Image (tube, coloured by chain):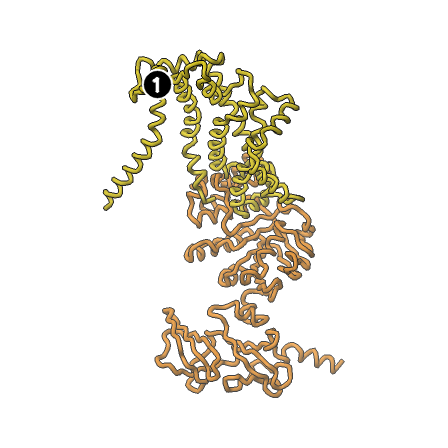
Chain colours: A orange, B yellow
């Protein structure tokens, strides 16, 4: 196993820029999940690392060596594909052994490695079967096995669970994580599924239009999303966004829907009236008899909780997640707890941190120095 | 309802079988009868069992007009058909492989050049082809029979479609596993398209077997006569009576090898023409 480093990796197809300079490091044994909507360049990134495409710019460094110009076969990287890409005419054993055979490993070694991997993946009884006689989950595990037996420096996963049904997906997700932890396999995992991203990743890369919008641990991404895109992408149902303006001194936000809210964690920079976007997750909105008017137009009971869709006084849509059942009636009142607010710039959508936390101490130093 | 449609389906099928099988049966029955009787139009639908030996004697001794025995003609036909089928498959396999999986300058030009030859079957280019063969001293040789028929746009196009349907991920998985071009061709591509290759083989074998015009032209030596040529040579030239019974016996013998090929590869043949999943 080894660490991976990407330096300014970029890829264009003709005039279309797919990847716009990605810098990234994956530590030894780390599982880095790349998540993003379709077309954000995440698959292209994976294919550049695999060597299936050549980057327009930038370098791929694996284990301290520049492998940018190397053939996929010479990179010591294994990949698990979305549709498994098993060789249809080969048995499970032959599928797993193919890469080893090409590398000229002795028969005994091949048998030992494939046997061990098959045992670990619960494929021991299926070695003579052809892929078409396997279920989706079994095919998936063969694809994993084919990668594992190679004992590569780096694993690439290209949406490996998206062809499975929901139940199997949860199970395979846990299996992949267990395997990855147990063998400390350095991995890059691409997915569009935020739940997969949150549960599997040591760190996440949220991609948008060929750039990394945020690189952080899953909880960090969830708690402090770098911009409105990331905030809206991670978390289900998605975060609510409300237009607002900065109040005098930067201590609070006046919502277009009415009330002003004081920030719990300190003032934001900018002149009074600066356009803001206030984000709040549906589960953080509270029912409060003293709160804003909220006209309900749809109630979705999910069993243990209920999603209530509706509008605020200014017509802005809001989704509220309530534990248990929703109270009856079309007119509710809601409050936005200041501690749970996310503040973004209305123009470019970037997160605005409180001034005191970051700028304050430094500004103080500057004065005394 | 169900039984009625079944009945109808069987009736239609039965009619089809009769339509296709009747001429074959007529040839078979006719072969055992008297040439004179057939010439008068007195052909019986019942074979004369006492004359079944005609098949064996024709096979061994020839038809009387041509010194070459029929088994020899069958061998020439089989050799020619096999040569054409295998040669065409090898050539078109490689050219389709190149066109689909490799990026090289003038790739599409090469492809379209192959495509255009569809409009130039043997019959159209027969005189220039004959001239080329004559310059190469390949007239009256086995190579002369087969080589001009080898280049095949049809097979190349068909295999190109088959290869295009192979998922990119399979190709990429093989690349990641370290398979080079030759290994990929031999270990992945050929086995994966085996059913299509088998279907192609059957079609091309029958095509080769039925060749008439080119063998007639290029091989005047009786030792290179194919069975199709041999049959036609017996047709009444004005001086002699056409020995219809002998001709029919030869026709029956000429049908057998293609039938064997089709029946032996039937399972693959159907799969290759209908299979969608890769």
- Residue B166, given in percent of the width and then of the height, sits at 52, 44
- Relative to B163, does residue A237 appear above or below in the rendering? below
From the viewer's side, name the closer residue of B251 and A213.
Answer: B251
- Residue A285, given in percent of the width and then of the height, sits at 46, 78
Q: Mark 1 packing: few (<14 Cα in 10 Å), some, or many (20+)?
A: some
Number of numbered discs? 1
Q: Is residue A101 visible?
A: no
- Residue B5 as seen in the image, left or right of residue A292: left
Q: Chain of mark 1?
A: B
- Relative to B52, does residue B8 appear above or below in the rendering? below
Give residue A207's quadrant in the image.
bottom right
Q: Which residue is mark 1?
A: B38
- Residue A264, given in percent of the width and then of the height, sits at 55, 81
From the viewer's side, name the closer residue of B137 and A214.
Answer: B137
- Residue B9 as seen in the image, left or right of residue B236: left
Q: Quadrant of the C terminus of chain A?
A: bottom right
- Residue A189, given in percent of the width and then of the height, sits at 55, 56
- Residue A292 as seen in the image, left or right of residue A43: left
Q: Is residue A251 visible?
A: yes
Helix, strand or loop at mark 1: helix
Give residue B89's quadrant in the image.
top right
Q: Residue at x 62, y 44 (%)?
A: B108
From the viewer's side, name the closer residue of A334 and B91.
Answer: B91
């Amino acid at each position: 196993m080894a660490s991976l480093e990407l330096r300014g990796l970029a890829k264009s197809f003709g005039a279309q820029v797919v990847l716009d300079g990605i810098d990234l490091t994956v530590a030894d044994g780390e599982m880095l999940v790349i998540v993003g909507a379709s077309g954000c360049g995440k698959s292209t990134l994976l294919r550049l690392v695999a060597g299936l495409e050549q980057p327009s710019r930038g370098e791929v460094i694996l284990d301290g060596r520049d492998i940018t110009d190397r053939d996929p076969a010479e990179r010591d990287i294994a990949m698990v594909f979305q549709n498994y890409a098993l060789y249809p005419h080969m048995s499970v054993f032959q599928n797993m052994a193919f890469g080893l055979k090409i590398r000229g490993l002795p028969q005994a070694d091949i048998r030992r490695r494939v046997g061990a991997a098959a045992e670990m993946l619960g494929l021991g009884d299926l070695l003579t079967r052809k892929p078409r006689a396997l279920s989706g989950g079994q095919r998936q595990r063969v694809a994993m096995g084919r990668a594992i037996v190679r004992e590569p420096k780096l694993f690439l996963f290209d949406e490996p669970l998206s062809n499975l049904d929901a139940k199997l997906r949860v199970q395979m997700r846990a299996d992949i994580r267990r395997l990855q932890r147990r063998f400390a396999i350095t991995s890059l995992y691409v997915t569009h599924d935020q739940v997969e991203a949150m549960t599997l990743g040591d760190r996440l890369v949220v991609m948008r239009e060929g750039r990394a919008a945020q690189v952080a641990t899953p909880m960090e991404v969830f708690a402090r999303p770098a911009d409105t895109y990331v905030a809206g992408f991670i978390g289900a149902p998605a975060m609510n966004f409300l237009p607002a303006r900065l109040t005098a001194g930067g201590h609070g936000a006046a919502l277009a829907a009415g009330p002003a809210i004081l920030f719990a964690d300190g003032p934001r920079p900018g002149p009074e009236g600066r356009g803001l976007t206030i984000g709040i997750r549906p589960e953080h909105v509270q029912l409060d008899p003293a709160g804003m008017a909220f006209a309900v137009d749809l109630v979705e009971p999910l069993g243990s909780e209920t999603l209530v869709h509706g509008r605020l006084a200014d017509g802005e849509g809001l989704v509220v997640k309530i534990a248990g059942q929703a109270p009856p009636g079309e007119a509710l009142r809601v409050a936005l707890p200041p501690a749970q607010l996310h503040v973004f710039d209305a123009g470019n959508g970037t997160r605005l941190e409180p001034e005191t936390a970051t700028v304050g101490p430094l500004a103080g130093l500057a004065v005394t120095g | 309802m169900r039984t009625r449609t079944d009945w109808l389906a069987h009736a239609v099928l039965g009619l089809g079988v009769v339509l296709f099988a009747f001429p074959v049966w007529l040839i078979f029955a006719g072969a055992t009868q008297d040439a004179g009787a057939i010439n008068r139009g007195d052909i019986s639908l019942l074979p004369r069992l006492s004359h079944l030996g005609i098949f064996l004697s024709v096979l061994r001794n020839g038809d009387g007009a041509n010194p070459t025995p029929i088994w020899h003609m069958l061998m020439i036909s089989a050799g020619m058909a096999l040569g054409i089928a295998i040669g065409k498959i090898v050539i078109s396999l490689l050219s389709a492989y190149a066109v689909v999986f490799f990026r090289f300058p003038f790739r599409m030009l090469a492809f379209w050049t192959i495509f255009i030859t569809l409009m130039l079957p043997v019959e159209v280019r027969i005189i220039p082809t004959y001239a080329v063969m004559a310059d190469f001293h390949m007239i009256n040789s086995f190579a002369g029979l087969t080589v001009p028929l080898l280049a095949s746009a049809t097979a190349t196009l068909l295999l190109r479609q088959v290869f295009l349907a192979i998922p990119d991920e399979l190709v990429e998985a093989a690349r990641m596993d370290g398979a080079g071009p030759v290994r990929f061709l031999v270990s992945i591509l050929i086995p994966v398209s085996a059913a299509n290759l088998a279907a192609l083989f059957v079609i091309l074998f029958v095509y080769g077997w039925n060749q008439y015009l080119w063998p007639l032209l290029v091989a005047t030596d009786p030792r290179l006569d194919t069975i199709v040529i041999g049959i036609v040579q017996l047709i009444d030239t004005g001086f002699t009576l056409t020995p219809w019974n002998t001709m029919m016996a030869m026709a029956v013998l000429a049908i057998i090898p293609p039938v064997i090929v089709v029946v032996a590869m039937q399972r693959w043949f159907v799969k290759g023409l209908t299979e969608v999943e890769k």
